[in-house]
Amino acid sequence: MQAASNAAQHAMGDYPTVVHPEYKPRQDGGTMKALAWFGTRDVRLVEAPIPDITEPDDVILKVTGTTICGSDLHLYNGEIINLQKGDILGHEFMGVVDRVGPNVKNLQPGERVVASFQIACGECSYCEQKLSSFCDRTNPSSLQNAMYGHRDAGFFGYSHFTGGFPGGQAEYVRVPKGNVNLLPVPDEIPDEKAIYLSDILPTSYHNVMDTGVSEGDVVGVWGLGPIGQCVAKWAQLKGASRIIGIDRVPERLAFAREKLGIETLDFSVHKDVVKRLQELVPGGLDVAMDCGTFHQPKTLVHKVEKALMLETDVSEIVNEMIMSVKKGGRCGIIAAYAGYTNHFNIGALMEKGVRLIGNGQAPVHKWWKEILNDYIIPGKFDPSFIITHRVPLDDFPKLYEAFDKREGGVEKVFVETQFSSPPSVGCPTTTRVSEWAKV
């Protein structure tokens, strides 16, 4: 993006103006609020042109709900490569169809939809299997191809490493392949229950399904952010006999105990997680799932190696999982790792016969209809349990800071725009971040 000064006062406030090179601004003009990245821990609300149809299968959405995801913190903290100043962030959002391209026949203006965080073409061999995160055609990043041997699909608002697509922390979004990447939402399902079909619900469900959690399993969940909390909930629904959540944030540990009724392990108290788990589960866990984060090393050696750029990620949680599961146990990684790590316990992996599964970026298209039709609509899974706060779009910069510091008991936030409906019954009402966080 290229930043340009703009002396004109925006109707809703004074913001710098940015213009993204991929944007085709709407012919009748108009600007929108959007959250853009300008550097490490530097995100700003900006004024950007409202996008228009660029390709015949595009859809333009008015955003009615957006949010911040734990993986957005990797962008915020400057740990994801190929970010450019002015990039509009956000990959988890929903809205109302505003405009459709001439090739879009399955959606109409005014229809409520939720967007897949990944952009799938709908036609390649992976898309034909509903493995939308593996789409071969929508991410042009040669760097990702060089690092991983192949490319994932393009993602909204997640750097040029994933295609450079402007994201959904904005009032409007252009959705490429909108006929493929938008799911209609029934009128009886409020936004608070639908928005997370965009990411955390398919992601957490995929983690549980891919690792084969089944009746009677003893499960360990590393990281009790929104993904970890949802993973624990899905594991309960799949019949796990015992679930132990591992974290160090008091509010998250309390949330898991009170909302889900699971056991918890505070690794700031029990610093030797493996030893404590072996005491709690002498035979070993059946399944261990990494729902945490790669950017907070525990030990001095990893802190030094990360600071010196000798590794991008740390192997501590993965090693703990391998050591904690029983022989022949299953370990799933849904946490967002980016590059390389040191001190990986490959010996224990081999000798114990552990199945280490890189769950990958979850294939949203494979699961979102199943989750909506089999769980949300019948009331078997109410995603709104994870929402702790609702804030206006103007508060996004402060929200990033509060979310990064885990202040105010924040788990998942519903961020409203000028197009949002009022809060649903039983869901948080609108507050300002300054009311509950010291930022």
Image (spheres, helix red, strand yellow):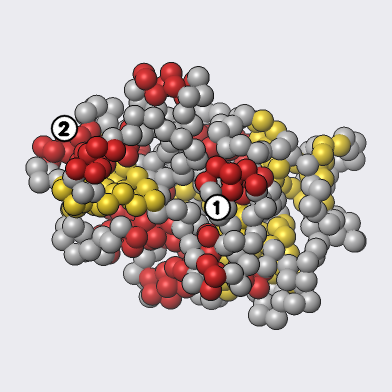
Please tell me how crowded label 1 is: few (under 14), some (14-19), or many (20+) other residues with Cα within 10 Å: few
Q: Nearer the viewer, residue 416 or 30?
A: 30
Tell which circle, 2 or 1, labels the residue nearer the N-terminal end.
Answer: 1
| Mark 2, residue position | 275
- Identity of the residue drawn at 44% across and 53% down: 360
Residue to which mark 1 is pinned: 150
Residue found 73% across the figure and 36% down from its top: 85
* Percent coordinates x, y for residue 11 in the rendering: 82, 47
Query: Residue 85 vs residue 268: left or right?
Result: right
Q: Does residue 61 lie above or below 145 as drawn?
A: below
Where's the C terminus, which quadrant? top right
259 to the left or right of 29? left
Amino acid type for the residue under numbered disc 2: Lys
Residue in the image at 79% along x and 47% along y = 20
Q: Nearer the viewer, mark 2 or mark 1?
A: 1
Question: Where is the N terminus found, in terms of image quarters?
Answer: top right
Task: Find the residue positioned furthest to the bottom.
Answer: 105
| Residue depicted at x 49% and y 65% | 131
- Give the x, y percent position of residue 112: 62, 71
Dot 2: what SS?
A: helix
Amino acid type shown at disc 1 = His
Q: Residues within 10 Å of mark 2 (few under 14, many from 20)?
A: some
Residue 403, percent across and down?
A: 50, 37
Q: Is residue 294 toward the left or the right of residue 318 in the image?
A: right
State how many labels appear: 2
> Is any part of residue 430 visible from this angle?
no
Q: Is residue 297 visible?
A: yes
Of the pair 82 and 223, the residue shown nearer to us: 82
